Image: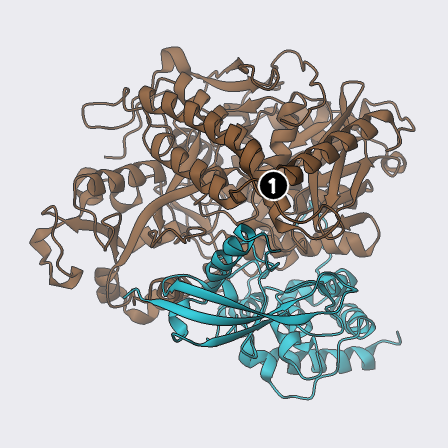
Amino acid sequence: MERTLNLHLKVWRQKNRNAEGRFVDYEANNISTEMSFLEMLDVVNEKLIKNGEDPIAFDHDCREGICGMCSLFINGRPHGPKDAITTCQLHMRNFKDGETIVIEPWRARAFPVIKDLIVDRSAFDRIMAAGGFISANTGGAPDANAIPISKNVAEDAMDAAQCIGCGACVAVCKNSSAMLFVGAKVAHLGRLPQGKAERERRVIAMVNQMEKEGFGACTNTEACSAECPKEISMDVIAMLRREYYRAMLKTEE
Amino acid sequence: MANEVKSRNAGKLDAKIPDGTLSEKWTNHKFQMKLVNPANKRKYEIIVVGTGLAGASAAASLAELGYNVKSFCYQDSARRAHSIAAQGGINAAKNYPNDGDSVFRLFYDTIKGGDYRSREANVYRLAELSVNIIDQCVAQGVPFAREYGGLLDNRSFGGAQVSRTFYARGQTGQQLLLGAYSALMKQVGLGQVKLYPRHELLDIVIVDGAARGIVTRDMETGAIESFSANAVILATGGYSNVYYLSTNAKGCNVTASWRAYKKGAFFGNPCFTQIHPTCIPVTGDHQSKLTLMSESLRNDGRVWVPKQAGDKRAPNEIPEDERDYYLERKYPSFGNLVPRDVASRNAKEMADAGKGVGSSGKAVYLDFADAIKRLGVEKIKEKYGNLFDMYKQITDEDPYKVPMRIYPAVHYAMGGLWVDYNLMTTVPGLFAAGECNFSDHGANRLGASALMQGLADGYFILPYTVGGYLANLKADKLTADHEAFKEAEKNVKDRITKLLSIKGNKTVDEFHRELGLVMWDYVGMSRNEKGLKHAIEKIKEIREDFWKNVKVLGENEELNQSLEKAGRVADFLELGELIAEDALHRKESCGGHFREESQTEENEAKRDDKNFSYAAAWEYKGDGVKPKLNKEELVFENVKLTQRSYK
């Protein structure tokens, strides 16, 4: 049933990349439990604008949990208190009346804050550009059924391919490691027969770029997988390591 | 209102359909187009705006050929465009299940589904290319669903009687987009594509009658920058957000298409908008967007309402004989799989008759009880697990136990920039691909066809037709220093200054909501003359009020989300009027456009082929001046026009 809540917000405000940030308190009153978390922020922003105050900047787009644009560290957890969803899918019924909610941006050296709750995740794109692909130029592909792929292999690849590139894994990791993100792509492409031809080049290039971007190393805390909105499994990190060692043994690059 | 660069008259409407029989046209055309020598390709610059399926696939494919490509998107990464949210699947005439599919049947279904308001030659080419798309995507590593034998699995979708839809769980759009994105990123890594994320197109620059570049705003710093090129491709998506509530992403907007329209590109069939039948109903005024539940759910879900109006019992308490499975009753051969427009209109009819369910009464049930009994929970979970989870997340109800509540919502724009067979607009050198053009879906799009069109345009059509255009150009040394760029930049800056200086008392969202309500009430699922005229007046009023009273805080030289929204809403406020004008002039009903004055005795859409068998292409004539209607007569040589019937 629909109820309304009164909430205290502590929101990270930061004017731009170079400015110093700080927490600012806001009251969010008469918030319907049917609202999504981002709709709650919309309501707060509308009020701020009416009062002539700069609204809170936050990234969002599809608002249905798939584009990976929304982020937010909510009460110390990426994408808030529920498992396996993004912030845009989080509903206010998961909060209590009178509760204080702390809202922060992703925090990692490789993800600098641009404004308020918005960070720069272009490091992920550069990792993808380094090797996150199968080189199959348009045209001339063989018939889609030419290579049978067992259902299990296709499903395993799909499990890894679900990554939405939101960066929650990095944000929650005490080392700001991007191993889950990179592992997911290496596992997705490496599990499929089409991806085997360039598996060595791919994993070395992606790992090198990952290190260049300033992401930390993995120490198997498993927080990344626990907080991943798509529940990408730790298996992909194991696979990333295997692929990397295998590639190091096979190539001289 | 801000100044606009004077539009040029783009001349006659020639669809440039190649000669020959339907099945020969594309092959002949590919041969007849001039080629650009491989060594010369690197001398050409191509701008691609948008990184959805059409934009990413076009940018990647053109870069692979050796062109220098600049790719722009408003999101923070090229992996996020709203193609990513397409759930159900992608059609292709592979006929793997051996159930009678063929290129001609896919063509025929698409033409019929579009209610005979699309161009035969384009639709046939789309059906023809559909098979290559699947091959290309599999080669890139898109993990489509497979059978135990290792071959690809198919399912069926609305408006078709064969199983031709390929899918990757309920995330087909995501997987296809990530495929195109990875191809794009490979070219970025090679330096063949330069990527500009968080850049919004704010104008298109025309020099000597051809599109030669764009002006953008860097959304982080506010810098207004110009980029020159030999051809510009818009792949900027649809305009459903003119309704405020839609299934589109919050950022989806018409600005790029609208700038193009004001520079001389004709706008095709703007009133052809699609209302998707299976969305999660609205809960309150705070609602910021609507969430779609894939149409594939209609394969196993049964749509019903109580027979008795005002029946407020819980669904499980309503006995079988007091339920009206109205789609199965009215359309016995297609049942729950009737096309989207038919399903949507029927849901509205039930709600209007007081038979709607849920607290608002604006919903119908989509019930999986029978399917769960027949197939078991596990099988249903495997097919639709993520959709069921998403529904539960949003509504707090468990669809494995109680029927889903669904209601129609605006979803897709069949209308868009008018393009010829080469996907070029009426402005030479300006191309439009994917949802932002008007090309293939006529008055109604069939499910699983948007992904097909986006990728056909980007992977397989533009790489040829853009080359064909460039091959006829003389190389020149035009740069962004040309005065046309300076003029466009100045117009862009003036408009931004204007928006920031109004300092009124209503927020951008308030205006957007106001516009959305007018659009939904009078230019929505069913339209009539009186309502449309009223809408046109209302939209003008809202627009005037906007330019006097909008409140946009902050400055240009910063990340300013209110300013971004204000620019987009200003354009929606003009587009809304054009949609209503187009809907008013088209006195027939067809596909998603339902005019109450034109219906059969059974309340089905009634076309008027004698008077309206054309694509409407609207030409901008200046602010405050009525746009000019140009007509592209549609010629049907291969299908017989019939009253659509799904009974």
Residue B438, given in percent of the width and then of the height, sits at 54, 29
Numbered circles on residues, count: 1
Q: Answer with left or right where residue B471 lies relative to residue B382.
A: right
Screen quadrant of the C terminus of chain B: top left
Q: Answer with left or right where residue B106 lies relative to residue B140.
A: left
Residue at image x 89%, y 31%?
A: B481
Q: How is the image coloured?
A: by chain
Looking at the picture, which amino acid does disc 1 mark?
Lys
Residue at image x 23%, y 23%?
A: B600
Residue on which disc 1 sits: B503
Residue at image x 55%, y 50%?
A: B82
Evaluate whether residue B449 shows in this view.
no
Give above or below for A135 relative to A12. above
The chain that appears cyan in the image is A
Local packing at callout 1 (Cα closer than 10 Å; few below 14, some 14-19, many 20+) is: some
Give above or below for B522 relative to B181. above
In terms of image quadrants, where is residue B447?
A: top left
Residue A14, given in percent of the width and then of the height, sits at 69, 65
Residue at image x 77%, y 72%?
A: A210
Give above or below for B137 relative to B628. below
Residue B141, given in percent of the width and then of the height, sits at 62, 60
Screen quadrant of the N terminus of chain B: top right
Q: Answer with left or right where residue A227 lies relative to residue B522.
A: right
Q: Mark 1 falls on what kind of element?
A: loop
In terms of image quadrants, where is residue B245?
A: top left
The chain that appears brown in the image is B
- Mark 1 falls within which chain? B
Along the line of sight, which residue is nearer the eye, B324 or B261?
Answer: B261
Evaluate whether residue A52 shows in this view.
yes
